[in-house]
Amino acid sequence: MRLGVIDVGSNTVHLLVVDAHPGGPPLPATSHKMLLRLSEHVDDEGRVDAAGAADLTRFVGECLEIAEEQGAEDLLPFATSALREAPNGEEVLAGVRAGTGVDLRVLSGEDEARLTFLAARRWTGWSAGRLLVIDIGGGSLELSIGTDEEPDVAASTMLGAGRVTRELLQDDPPSPEQVKDARRRVRAVLAREMRPFSKQGRPDFAVGTSKTMRSLARLTGAAPSSEGPFVARRLQAADLGDVIARLTPMPSSRRTGLPGVSESRAHQVLAGAIVAEAAMDLLGVSELEICPWALREGVILRYLDTMEESARALSAQSGGVASGA
């Protein structure tokens, strides 16, 4: 079947249309992105402003039209931290629903971590053993670890690359003092989350997901996306200090010329490097494999699993009725 996934993140509204069925990988058919930077459309109280809400409704409507044109049979629309934390989030969601008919599901931070873990587990397979997943988004950082398809520990912290940029790296470029303070404060926040992960022991395999991790890996020499998803890409903890030193004196306008850094992400890639460095260090991980599947794929896989479970339950019920007759 053909599915459309609408992902409302802190930076973009992203439509992914895939061909998918239970037991097989979702195959991308088309992708459409719109830069929104919803997290920048907030007032001092964290409320999404009228312009941001109107743009969101318009963009979601555009995604719906494209999904329908591509023959999507069902739509899986969701939103993450930008709407999750907004005091007027329900009001914004109601506006989207009234304007487009699309009912956005707001995922909790733990939901994000669990669904991303599911996607990473399916990609890496059971041979990965105890799997650790680090996912840096625009508004939050998700961490998860476990040996099954459901992680044993899942956590979300407000350390997304966009948020750290807005709150700790306001200057462009930031001063060395700002960067030093940001590194200290990020580690202090992250250290509070470490105990449950430390109790799990060392992971057998560790992956990083999402655009920030892909950009950082590309900055340290990984293959470009044009070489396809099956090329191994890695990020070394030892390289992140050099990345931070390299990016610190650069204004965002100059970062766009670097490998893997898009114009829409240039302003926050330094913060992403700071968060990645702290997470890898505190979790005792020297290397991450970059996983091309993340939250969107996790949402699709969970939907397919639910379909399969429903079909089995219906089949069992039908068999029971037949036996009873």
Image: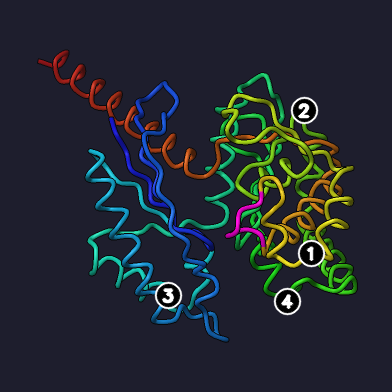
Is residue 168 within the magenta segment? no
Q: Position of residue 123 (x, y in %)?
A: 57, 27
Is residue 263 within the magenta segment? yes
Q: Which disc is residue 5 wearing?
A: none
Rendered view: 168 above or below 12: below
* Horizontal arrangement in the rendering, residue 315 relative to residue 126 (left or right): left
Closest to the camera, between mark 2 and mark 3, is: 3
Q: Which residue is mark 2?
A: 204
Which residue is drawn at the image coordinates 76% and 73% (left, top)? 168
- Per the rendered image, the range of residues in magenta is 261-266
Q: Which disc is residue 52 wearing?
A: 3
Rendered view: 277 above or below 21: below
Which numbered disc flags the more N-terminal residue, 2 or 3? 3
Q: Secondary structure at mark 1?
A: loop
On the rendered image, what quadrant is the N terminus found in?
top left
Which numbered disc flags the more N-terminal residue, 1 or 2? 2
* Horizontal arrangement in the rendering, residue 194 relative to residue 53 (left or right): right
> Type of residue at label 2?
Asp
Which numbered disc flags the more N-terminal residue, 4 or 1? 4
